[in-house]
Image (cartoon, helix red, strand yellow):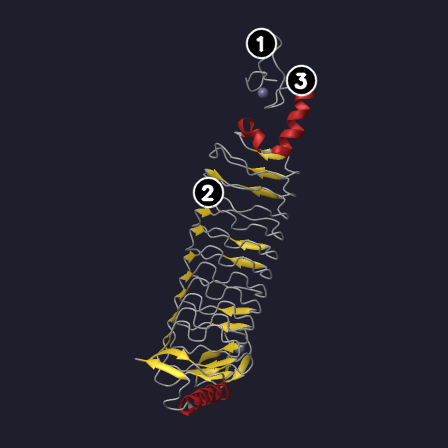
Amino acid sequence: MALVNAICTSCNKTVEVDNSKEAWVCPHCSTPFIVEKAVKKYKSQHKEVARKVMAVKKNSNDFEIKDGVLTAYKGKADEVTVPGEVHKIGDHVFENNTGLKNIIIHDKVESIGEYAFRGCTALEKIKFPDSIKEIGTWAFRGCTSLKELVLPPQLRSITDCLFADCSSLESVEFPPMLTEIGAFSFSGCKSLKAVEIPKYVAQMGKYAFSGCEKIEKVAIPEGVSQLEECAFANCTALSVVGLPKGLKSIGASAFQNCTALRNIEIPAGVLSVDGFRGCTGLRAIEIPAGVTALGDFSGCINLESIRIPASVKKVSGGFNDCPKLMNISWSNLSDNASNFPSYYETVVAGRKTAGKCVYCGGDFKLLSKVCKVCGKKKDY
Ligand SMILES: [Zn+2]
Ligand SMILES: [Zn+2]
């Protein structure tokens, strides 16, 4: 058997097939196809790219090339083929080129520079050759016509802001060996429907998927120990989140305004929990034993109950505008009750009126005015 490249006849993605077989099932779309046809398709597409590369005029005034790096493009074509001698598309080359619809990149190109296609608002598709190893920061930010992406297999890192504000982007296929997803990399991709984060990803930057309004579920890979600030903020359709066992901290506003989130299981081993402000769908939350820092839960207007372990000694605010939060299970609650304004107003006011201990609701000893249950003095 020999593995060769082919193109799936239903989804058009490149796949490796065993060419001694008659049929093969596409790993991307699960559709079976005829091996011979798919291999032919691959060859003809490669021929097509090669033909277009050959057709690029030598010494064309449209391109400036220095030591194999494309440094400028001065033409106005809506389809541009990268010249054969180029191995890198330089920084800013097509930035804000709003006429560019399609770019043909051959398989000698290994990297794409920073801001290279930023603001190419007409760019509808891009087929990355397998040779691409690096794509610079901001390279495709604001490419508002891009619909789908299959990232090249050798790419290890998605750089900061790479695909931010690609508002039409519906699907992304990540390379399997990816280890890093940069800050703001998919921020504002409001059409993105699903993401499957590859298992070796260990770093995810702040705001990485913020404002991805269509994503419904996400599983964070095992190697991620820290969820950064606003990583999934304003993902208003997100309802299923799988957090990894090795997680240590959930950063500020990580899930802020994820209004569809009804429950979340925080794994044991987490030390710091923040990031759920404005999660109006949350009904109950359980903070695992060992957590020492608890952040902001303001605006969780439907949160009814919370369980907090004794390892949390203090909260400094953070439960404002949680009108239904009356069921608080926490051994240190009595000293922190005023940090839960609704609870405090309802429960504490009721205890005062009834002449009971404000901390625990117990009765006072008649003469000393000390609570029979918790031992605290009557202080009102
Ligand atoms: Zn397919
Ligand atoms: Zn008491």
Which quadrant holds the N terminus? Answer: bottom left
Which numbered disc flags the more N-terminal residue, 1 or 2?
2
Q: Amino acid at mark 3?
A: Gly
Residue 69 placement: quadrant: bottom left
Local packing at callout 1 (Cα closer than 10 Å; few below 14, some 14-19, many 20+) is few
Between 23 and 40, the residue placed more toward the observer is 40
CA gap, disc 1 to disc 3? 14 Å
**At which x and y percent is residue 264?**
56, 49
Q: Secondary structure at mark 3?
A: loop
What distance separates the C-alpha of mark 1 from that of mark 2? Answer: 41 Å
- Asked if residue 274 is positioned above or below residue 38 in the image, the reply reads above
Q: Is residue 279 left or right of residue 179?
A: right
The 10 Å Cα crowd at callout 2, few under 14, some 14 to 19, many 20 or more, is: many
Q: Name the amino acid type tagged 2.
A: Ser
Judging by the rendered image, the residue that carries numbered circle 3 is 355
Identified at 46% across, 54% down, the residue is 206
Residue under circle 1? Answer: 368
- Vertically, is 127 above or below 259? below
Query: Which structural element holds mark 1?
Result: loop
- What residue is pinned by disc 2? 272
Q: In the image, what residue type sits under mark 1?
A: Ser
Image location of residue 233, percent across then percent down: 54, 53
Residue nearest the viewer, comparing 257 with 262:
257
Residue 42 visible at all: yes
Q: Is residue 350 left or right of 328 when viewed as pictured?
A: right
